[in-house]
């Protein structure tokens, strides 16, 4: 049932189809109600025309609604094309999941279907065996008024949704929501349980695709039933070729391979449902395209960095425990690999720092992001977390400490550089202004002349 719900969320036609079915049922119900009620009395809100007038009204509604539907569909296609070319093809799913766009198309299709169903119920002429479903025709007029209101709202909504600020804010909000679900604040840091020793039975992937979701509960039930330890070999967001190893099962009693594969959902592209890195990837793609010479829009890159700044701070101030499930006796049952803080930080900053080293705005944003998160606090003691700070330093590729007789001098120089860049906001701004006409920007200086290395496997 859960898989069906996730599948329907990505189908743009699902809500319009539901509206059309509901409209057909309503049309049949109201025409049947008209056949049983005495509507010969003239009421001010009921349709008072004859069969010819009802047919003309319903025919006009049918014609106009099919035109409205075509217009809405054309506008939606243009918006999708503009978004794909201007920002990133990976943000199209945000528009396809937009419930208001689906509702607008559903209202127009529902009005068309409803008028068509009511039209077939109009019989006879004004002189011979006439039947006009007055309540149903009046409701059709109400559907038209509702369609006009929805159309005006749709125009406003579509004009706002293609603004770059709206797109960035929407992706940022969706990523924050997933981050809160996946890494809540009240979760304590737990140690990673090592995998058991010995040989493991490898389960091959039944098809190719990207790991989108993993049913931890189903895997845990299988592991407890068979006394095994199940380890997923691909993290959420990674591509899996057909026939490649997907799962490793430690234990003598191996569960059925088909049931194991059914707990790992593969799709054609990454999904934000269990993948915080995919939201950050969309933001980074928008920033990289904005920094490209063909677009040259550093302000958009700064807006993206602001969203990434908030996400990195949230990740820096909370525990990121391993995704593992244990049995009641403490034995490891399920292990799903997930990125650590250094992977998230590298994804957020490395590529932007590489492609926008001479842009003051993007350099300042990256510097502020790294500076304000450089010494993250432990939520329980409010003291700097040395482990997280070392992870951030490694992700940013800070200079390593030298060895030999010059080690102490190198440590002092490294400590001074680190403090002067990240600890003092005024000093950071001054260094940015001073470097405006001299070589690469702040993050280019921090990362070194060779730029960033290979993107993280799990998040790139």
Image: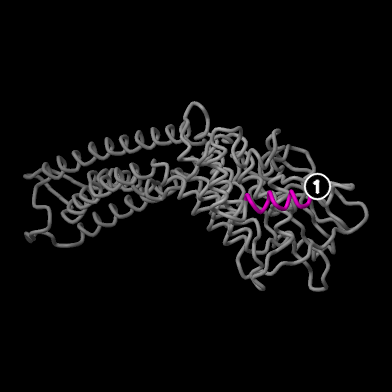
Residue 339 in sight here: no
In the foreground, 137 or 333: 333
Crowding around mark 1 (Cα neighbors within 10 Å: few <14, some 14 to 19, many 20+) is many
Q: Is residue 200 magenta?
A: no
- Compared to residue 314, the image places residue 452 above or below, namely above
- What residue is rendered at 27% in x and 38% in y? 68
Using the image as rendered, state which of residue 168 and residue 102 is in the foreground.
168
Pinpoint residue 188: horizontal percent, then vertical percent.
69, 69
**Circle 1 is placed at which residue position?**
203
Which quarter shows the N terminus? bottom right
In the rendered structure, the answer to whether residue 6 lies left or right of residue 250 reads left
Instruction: Give the dominant element type of the magenta stretch: helix, strand or loop.
Output: helix
The magenta segment: 411-421
Q: Secondary structure at mark 1?
A: strand
Residue closest to the eye, 411 or 293: 411
Q: Is residue 412 magenta?
A: yes
């Amino acid at each position: 049932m859960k898989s069906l719900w996730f599948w329907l969320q990505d189908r743009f036609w699902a809500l319009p189809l539901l509206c059309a079915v509901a409209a057909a049922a309503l049309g049949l119900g109201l025409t049947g109600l008209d056949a049983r009620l005495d509507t010969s009395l003239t009421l001010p809100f009921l349709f008072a025309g004859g069969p010819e007038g009802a047919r003309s009204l319903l025919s006009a509604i049918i014609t106009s609604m099919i035109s409205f539907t075509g217009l809405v569909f054309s506008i939606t296609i243009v918006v999708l094309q503009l978004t794909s070319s201007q920002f990133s093809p990976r943000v199209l799913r945000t528009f396809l999941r937009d419930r208001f766009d689906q509702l607008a198309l559903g209202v127009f299709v529902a009005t068309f279907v409803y008028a068509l169903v009511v039209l077939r119920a109009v019989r006879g002429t004004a002189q011979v065996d006439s039947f006009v479903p007055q309540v149903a025709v009046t409701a059709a007029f109400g559907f038209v008024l509702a369609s006009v209101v929805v159309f005006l709202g749709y125009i406003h909504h579509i004009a706002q949704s293609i603004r770059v600020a709206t797109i960035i804010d929407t992706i940022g909000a969706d990523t924050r929501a997933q981050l809160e679900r996946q890494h809540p604040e009240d979760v304590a840091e737990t140690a990673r349980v090592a995998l058991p020793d010995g040989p493991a039975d490898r389960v091959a992937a039944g098809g190719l695709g990207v790991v989108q979701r993993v049913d931890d509960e189903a895997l845990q039930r299988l592991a407890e039933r068979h006394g095994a330890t199940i380890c997923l070999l691909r993290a959420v967001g990674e591509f899996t070729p057909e026939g490649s190893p997907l799962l490793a099962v430690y234990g003598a009693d191996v569960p059925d391979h088909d049931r194991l594969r059914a707990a790992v959902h593969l799709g054609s592209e990454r999904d934000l449902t269990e993948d915080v890195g995919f939201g950050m990837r969309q933001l980074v793609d928008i920033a990289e395209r904005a920094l490209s010479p063909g677009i040259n829009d550093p302000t958009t890159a700064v807006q993206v960095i602001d969203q990434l700044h908030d996400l990195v701070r949230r990740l820096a101030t909370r525990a990121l425990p391993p995704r593992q499930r244990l049995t009641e006796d403490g034995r490891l049952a399920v292990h799903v690999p997930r990125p650590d803080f250094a992977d998230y930080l590298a994804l957020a900053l490395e590529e932007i720092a590489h492609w926008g080293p001479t842009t003051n705005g993007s350099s300042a944003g990256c510097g502020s992001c790294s500076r304000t998160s450089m010494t993250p606090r432990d939520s329980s003691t409010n003291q700097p977390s040395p482990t997280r700070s070392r992870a951030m330093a490694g992700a940013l590729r800070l200079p390593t400490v030298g060895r030999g007789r010059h080690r102490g001098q190198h440590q002092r120089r490294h400590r001074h550089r680190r403090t002067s860049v990240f600890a003092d906001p005024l000093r950071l701004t001054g260094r940015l202004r001073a470097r405006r006409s001299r070589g690469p920007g702040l993050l280019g200086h921090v990362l070194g002349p060779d730029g960033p290395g290979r993107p993280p496997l799990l998040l790139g």
